[in-house]
Amino acid sequence: MRTIFTLLGLFIFDFSNAQFIEKLAKKTQKTSERAIERKIEQKTTKTTNDGMDEVLNAKKETSKTNTDSSDEITSKTKASKKDSDFISGNKSIFEEKFSKEIVGDFPVNWFTNSSGEITNISSNKWLQLSDKGSFSPMNVSKLPENFTFEFDVTTTDNFNFYSTPLNVVFTEKKSKADDIWNTTLKRKEAVVFNVHPANSLSGTGRSEIFVISEKKEIIKNKVDIPVFNKNKNKVRVQIWRQKNRFRMFIDGKKFWDLPSAFQEANYNQIIFFIGTYKKTVDKLFISNIKLAEAVADTRHKLIETGTFITNEILFDSNKASIKPSSKTVLDELGKVLSENTNIKISITGHTDSDGNDGENLKLSEKRAQSVSDYFATNFGVQKSRMTNLGKGELEPIADNKLEEGKKQNRRVEFNIIK
């Protein structure tokens, strides 16, 4: 295995051959001249001024937390859910706050080809990343086709314009050698993005995105991210994959939305990697990491096909009260209805065959009513746009003699009324 090279990643990846990162490093050095800096400063001045308002708004948004601890979903979630399009997955796969790690050590269940150590910042533990290295959680072995991935990132004060960004890779690991993001470009498929808090002289941040398919770069772009800057150098990065779609949010504000980023590949690895720090005092830190399975792309499926069926809306046994674990899929659908005010839908509840036929019929209708009440309360959807139906056990789609079949039959169906 060839040793990992220096990666600055400030401008453009060159994926055209096996030495693309080496060329990137040379190209980045040349493009760091003062003339380019002045040009960037002129282009981002207005963005930065506007960004200060966004920073204040982001602080307000992130201060809103969901305090609903009851079994039944109430209107307490209304404000927080409308602040952002991002909805965290509700089936946790991997979480890491480094709470059990020893300060000064590298975490046990992580891999690196460089170095790093656990550090205390404001009474919380963070992983400090040394330069020229790859960092991977070893407990991640598969990435679902629908997932969310979140982490906090912060830097030392006055992080240098020329220092490395924080790069993140979603890719396929085939051998232990793939733990290192290297120059041989063995990866057939990968989604790569980065964030940097000071990617211009004016101090505003920037993000870049690169998509590799069949060992070729098919997508490449960059965008300013004013909410991450020298004055606000701690943010939460949020990734939402819905099959092929890639979305990136920072503190709830969306900056990337690519419908064809993830390819038909076995994505099973997450890698953080960084290049070189310009100054020895510059450091990047990550913490509060969460990978969770998310729901399918309900928005586009409902709009494009006119129907959506789910068994992820759960109710208390023999009741119509919605369980909190149903919030993710409900909020996705609620946003569809609130953004498309011309749409009218029917909401149909279905049950398995356990219990009395007549009672199941009434229960399924009450559950459909609970769903429409949720949309009205939390997303302001007019009740006149929703028709509630109950089919009980009359239309099974699986064998009610099997537990898995019963689970599929306990479902809610949504159809656009034309």
Image (tube, rainbow, N blue to C red):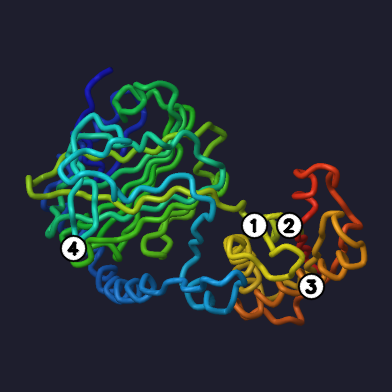
Mark 4, residue position: 230
Residue for point 80% across, 64% down: 349
Q: CA distance from mark 2 to mark 3?
A: 19 Å
User: Circle 1 sits on which residue?
Assistant: 298
Residue at the spot x=23%, y=50% of the render? 285
Helix or strand or loop: what does disc 2 sit on?
strand
Amino acid identity at mark 2: Phe
**Label 1 vs 2, first from the N-terminus:** 1
**Nearest to viewer (mark 2 / mark 4):** 2
Q: Nearer the viewer, mark 2 or mark 3?
A: 3
User: 10 Å neighbourhood of mark 2: few (<14), some, or many (≥20)?
Assistant: some
Question: Which of 386 and 31 lies nearest the eye of the viewer?
Answer: 386
Q: Secondary structure at mark 3?
A: helix
Q: Label 2, on which residue?
A: 308
Which comes before the other along the chain, label 2 or label 3? 2
**Looking at the rendering, which quadrant does residue 278 occupy?**
top left
Question: Which badge, 4 or 1, is on the more N-terminal residue?
Answer: 4
Q: Residues within 10 Å of mark 4 (few under 14, many from 20)?
A: many
Is 147 or 213 nearer to us in this picture? 147
4 or 3: tag closer to the N-terminus: 4
Horizontal and vertical percent position of residue 343: 72, 72
